[in-house]
Image: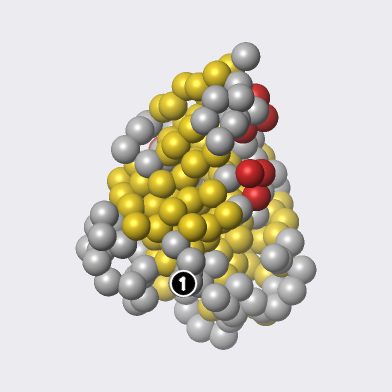
Amino acid sequence: AQSVTQLDSQVPVFEEAPVELRCNYSSSVSVYLFWYVQYPNQGLQLLLKYLSGSTLVKGINGFEAEFNKSQTSFHLRKPSVHISDTAEYFCAVYQAGTALIFGKGTTLSVSS
Amino acid sequence: SAVISQKPSRDICQRGTSLTIQCQVDSQVTMMFWYRQQPGQSLTLIATANQGSEATYESGFVIDKFPISRPNLTFSTLTVSNMSPEDSSIYLCSVEDGVRTQYFGPGTRLLVL
């Protein structure tokens, strides 16, 4: 069965520092990959997605992610974070014939 | 992307009662989904709701506890029946855009006392 592992439950960083949130998935077959963000007391917002094509995907709010098939990873990056990026980030994987599977989430805390 | 609204946004309920959550989409969609997010946890799919057919429930979720309606292509309801404190969660609906991408509503925050 497909699974998603977010390697860090909490990531504290200072404002304007770079950040990487790590995500690994289990399947070696074709998958679609997503990152969602959940701000406090809000629903999930799609940050970016990989369906096919270029392995470097750019999303909203300056985030990007790189699909690495050989390492089955889809890490999320931002070169310079802001206080407003403080939120919960979820990696999710969709494989044909299955449901969308979410990781446990990574709490990004940005401080000044 | 579709604009999704949910009602109520939050509620506090007594154990043993039921709550119906509404999900409205601003465009017609084939597939709608209901998720539960327990406190501090990730999302778990409850069921898939397709118009014109019975909802498909995931393992661990049953229709008697979480009945779902899907009367048309823009609306769905989820009822949480005979609630207990363990049902305290955020309930989210989502829709798929036809290219395997799901968009989520703002969620309904439920506290059961």
Q: How many marks are shown on the rendered structure?
A: 1
Chain to which mark 1 belongs = A
- Name the spot of residue A6 as percent of width and height, x first: 35, 42
A64 and A39: which is toward the camera: A64
Q: Quadrant of the N terminus of chain A?
A: bottom left
* Residue A20 drawn at (x, y percent): 44, 37
Q: Residues within 10 Å of mark 1 (few under 14, many from 20)?
A: few
- Amino acid identity at mark 1: Ser
Residue drawn at the location 60% of the way across and 73% of the way down? B97
Looking at the image, which residue sits at the far top? A112
What colour scheme has been applied to the protein in the rendered image?
Answer: secondary structure
Query: Can residue A77 be seen from the camera position used here?
Result: yes
Residue at 47 percent of width and 45 percent of height? A76
* Residue topped by disc 1: A52
Q: Against B59, is B38 above or below? A: above
Figure check: A31 above or below A90: below
